[in-house]
Image (cartoon, coloured by chain):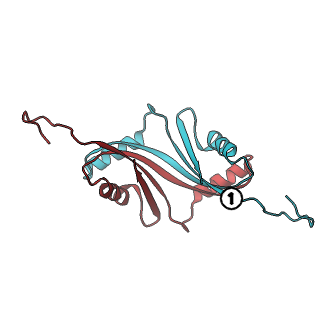
Chain colours: A red, B cyan
Amino acid sequence: MRSEQGERVRTMQVRTVRIVVSLKPGVLDAPGQAIRQGLDALGHPGVQHVRAGKYFEVELDDDGRVEERVREICEGFLANTLIEDYRYEIL
Amino acid sequence: MRSEQGERVRTMQVRTVRIVVSLKPGVLDAPGQAIRQGLDALGHPGVQHVRAGKYFEVELDDDGRVEERVREICEGFLANTLIEDYRYEIL
């Protein structure tokens, strides 16, 4: 949007989205296994299972289609949907 | 705990904990910046800010001090508390 003077005017609110990307169930999670074994060896028994993933906090302009854009961003860039699931929470 | 026969008996429930580790505010987040610039270049304008972090889903025996153990695990192993914050949610 531009004002009468041609300057860019920001009228959109910014939304924060929390995104978690993690391996699909059944896909070997080598880092997670290594962490579990390491914790056990380093004095933390009783940890049954660890799965490692990625976390992103994204702030984007609210143009009314935030959810659609978040899905495009996740599927196109942040997650490899062959082996990873993603979930998000729009704050 | 051991049964009368000396076998190990599992009586503890397992709790799932979701842990997010992210850089403290003010610490340069180069991956997050690269993602933001990449999204902009690849057709996703309007992303103001990205912060990248790590996500862990941990299942551990509930011995009555789950929260204390989770903090120890985060501070000792999963997070570098000089530059990273962590938060967790015990399900």
Quarter location, residue B91: bottom right
Q: Is residue B81 left or right of residue A85?
A: right
Location of residue A28 in the rendering, given as x and y in whole percent from the top left corner: 57, 64
**What residue occupies the far right of the structure in this picture?**
B4
In the displayed structure, B50 sits above or below A85; it is above
**Circle 1: residue type:** Val
Residue nearer the viewer, B33 or B74 = B74
Q: Position of residue B4 (x, y in %)?
A: 92, 65
* Secondary element at image label 1: strand
**Which subunit holds the residue at mark 1?**
B
**Is B7 on the left or on the right of B77, as rendered?**
right
Percent across and percent down for residue A62 are 28, 47
How many labels sit on residues? 1
Q: Is residue B67 left or right of residue A17?
A: right
Residue under the point 36% across and 47% down: B35
Residue at horizontal 21 percent and vertical 38 percent from the top: A10
Residue at mark 1: B14
Q: Quadrant of the N terminus of chain B?
A: bottom right
Q: Nearer the viewer, residue B15 or B32?
A: B15
Residue extending farthest left: A4
To which quarter of the image does residue A9 belong?
Answer: top left
**x, y percentage for residue A69?**
30, 55
Callout 1 environment at 10 Å: few (<14), some (14 to 19), or many (20+)?
A: some
